[in-house]
Image (cartoon, grey):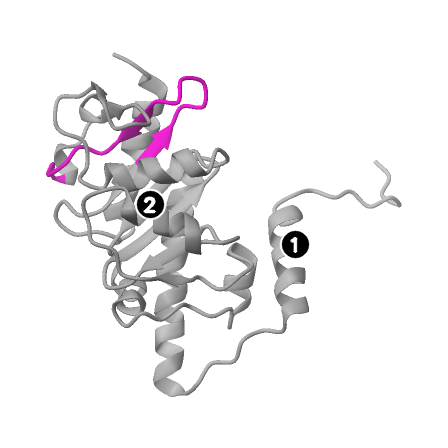
Amino acid sequence: MLLPKLREEVYRANMALPANNLVTWTSGNVSGRDPETGLVVIKPSGVLFPDLTPGNMAIVDLEGNVVEATHGPSTDTYSHLAIYRGRPDVNGVTHTHSNYATAFAAVGRSIPVCLTAVADEFGTVIPCAPYVRIGDQGIGEVILQHIGNSVAILMKQHGVFTIGATVMKAVKAAVMVEDIARTVWLALQIGQVEELPAEEIAANFDRYQNRYGTFQASQNHSL
């Protein structure tokens, strides 16, 4: 069986979607790219999440040719592959129709940087790209055109795509998009939201990405 470690990682990542209430039935998928071979492991099409295993993850090459599979690969495979071909820094892609984030997509509305949580995790607006018909690489190409510096994007009248240097970073971004979208939606029931100033966005993003969770010993500290 090819790529057993990546199969396990992609399986666990896919199982994180229902665990975080990001998907229903068989919708949604996660893929991961092996940097050495360029092969992509992705959720199989039409398989219920409880029936997923590392062994039934599908493996395809970057052109979409099936390399190893017990079921057909996800119907979103070509979208994922277009992203990988255009972004060599990306090794994980997640797609969901999570409720609150997809509500923004339904009305073609980006999620503004109106919270420090958005600044921390994304450092920029979460853009909403134009509608694209499902079924080929067109969605992936439009994502590449519109995602900019974000690791998340909404596809108008469709759903959410997130990317990451690793599989789990892409999944984390999907979890955070939904959490942020819910909070912003709730805020909009109260009134209009206000975007943070650019310097505050940059400062929060730098702090969270480069210093959050790291240990910095004081120069005056003695053992």
Q: Is residue 11 above or below residue 189?
A: above
Q: Quadrant of residue 128?
A: bottom left
Location of residue 146 in the rendering, given as x and y in whole percent from the top left corner: 43, 56
Location of residue 140 in the rendering, given as x and y in whole percent from the top left corner: 33, 45
Q: Does the image show residue 167?
A: no
Sequence-first tag of 1 and 2: 2
Where is mark 2, residue-wise?
140
Left or right of 130? Residue 46 is: left
Where is mark 1, residue-wise?
206
Q: Which residues are magenta?
A: 31-48
Q: Is residue 131 above or below residue 223?
A: below
What amino acid type should be assigned to the residue bearing mark 2?
A: Gly
Q: Quadrant of residue 187?
A: bottom left
Q: CA distance from mark 1 to mark 2?
A: 28 Å
Quick one: label 1, few (<14), some, or many (20+) residues within 10 Å? some
Q: Residue at x 65, y 54 (%)?
A: 206
Left or right of 166? Residue 106 is: left
Q: Find numbered disc 1 in the image and state the secondary structure of the residue it sits on.
A: helix
